[in-house]
Amino acid sequence: MAERTTVEIVDPRLAEAARDRLDSLVSDRVASRLTARDATLWGPDAESEAAIRLSWTTLHKSSRPLIGEIEALRAELRSEGLDRIVLAGMGGSSLAPEVITATEGVALTVLDTTDPGQVADALAGDLERTVLVVSSKSGTTVETDTHRRVFAEAFADSGIDAASRMIVVTDPGSALAELAESQGYRRVFLADPDVGGRYSALTAFGLVPAGLAGADVARLLDQAALLADELAADSPDNPALRLAAALGAAHDAGAEKVVLADTGSGITGFGDWAEQLVAESTGKQGTGLLPVVVEGPHAPGYTDADATATAVAVGPADDVAAVATTGPLGAQFLLWEYAVAVAGRLLGINPFDQPDVEAAKKAARTLLDNPQALTASEEPAAVIGAVEVYGSLGAAARGTLGEVLREFAGGVADGGYLAVQAYLDRLDDASASLVRGEIARRTGIPTTFGWGPRFLHSTGQYHKGGHRNGSFLQLTGAVEEDVAVPGRPYTLGTLQLAQALGDAQVLADTGRPVLRLHLTDRAAGLADVVRAVQELTR
């Protein structure tokens, strides 16, 4: 018996508040119009963008031909002893494949970083068995192009024909498609150009790397297909309409944060994928839904008063959650895509653009073009142990790191949030993620965590375009062994620092408080930061 996909609005007050919105969505035939790709659903300002972003509603059908193509290529690769798949991709090009493969327990090395140590570790794998999937919708994503260059050189240095190990996923006509053709790359998969990156889980961007790694992509499409008719129905029982109505009602009541916790769904890392979908789709024009991914239903921040506790559940939710969704992964992808697009209508925004993402990229490019400005950045306001402190400090500049953090946390706006942004190695420096829960538990401040630069392709849009009540704690670290970028006048370490400083500059220019802690020794510095966080109090 197929696993049912449901949305339960557990909180009776939220259910009552959502009822009018749900009735309106049904009477306006929003679900059927969305399935029919009606670009007028979000108003005239969004119509031109929406007209070229709605093919995701029928991917459970249109992506079927990929199944055989992926299976044939995987068999071909394995016959040659090529069974290690490395994915170079950012945002929508990496988050879905990572969730799919982690949930199915198959190995996929994901490179969505510019950290030299993490990239070097990926290079240190067995290149004789390695294939690189280069995945970029635009074909010009700087991180992905960097990974391609680094691996191409490593393959060549090992006496391997680099082109034979390159598989590309991109949009038709992109610069990457043209490069792949001219270089004779092994295979190019052209994705549907009328699907935005964060809605691309069931396109070639999600399915090719996951399928080559061994995931059952046919099952994902089957799961989505079983729910598709229900999502297209103009009915109050439509789970996507129910979820959208709940999120819209909660936002209008002041709960702008959506706190996501897994309660035994069997899906690994779903919150990280949903985080991009929600933040980048809704966080603009000074409004939006801020996703806060927490470690579980008992984690600090799950039941904050100004948040909607949302469980990705295995069965009926307990009384802690306000909303719960159940269902298999393929169905959950499609459910959340429908719901977030409809929530955009309720919030009065265009869920398919990302107007504030480019600002941080431009600032980083400016710094890369002027290396002197990058290396001659401001002097630290304080040096405390293995941590250099950058930012505007008061009396805390003469105190401990705990006092620095206490002063910064004390400046978070009422009803605001604190975002921890770690431009570090998310494998070797994984303990940095513990900071989120500790800050939330000790201060009561809603706290998010993101690895840089991957969050720039995700929550970065909300940080600059959403509600103007965020404060930002950056963690950067010294680079022990840098990695040169072939054909470029910079290293990975330089690029990583430029991305951090560029984003900090844009945030500061828009009035957002930023504190940067630079770890001169990563292990010792992280230990210092954790100890300082433990000194925080409400």
Image (cartoon, grey):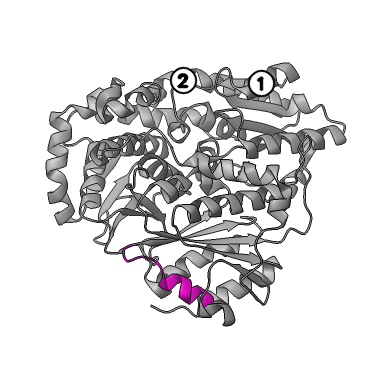
The image shows residue 339 at horizontal and vertical percentages of 30, 38
Disc 1 versus disc 2: nearer the observer: 1
Q: Is residue 462 above or below residue 432?
A: above
Residue type highlighted by circle 2: Arg
**What's the magenta region?**
403-415
Distance from label 1 to label 2 (Cα)? 18 Å
Front residue of 177 and 417: 417
Q: Helix or strand or loop: what does disc 2 sit on?
A: loop
The image shows residue 232 at horizontal and vertical percentages of 25, 26
**Left or right: 278, with 398 as reference point:** left
Name the residue beneath numbered marker 1.
Answer: 187
Name the residue: 41% across, 24% down: 59
Q: Earlier in the sequence, mark 1 or mark 2?
A: 2
Name the residue: 73% across, 32% down: 82
Q: Helix or strand or loop: what does disc 1 sit on?
A: strand
Disc assigned to residue 262: none
- Say which quarter of the image contains residue 488: top right
**Magenta residues: mostly which secondary structure?**
helix
Front residue of 6 and 156: 156
State which quarter of the image contains the C terminus.
bottom left
Name the residue beneath numbered marker 2.
Answer: 64
Residue type highlighted by circle 1: Arg
Residue 83 shows in this picture: no
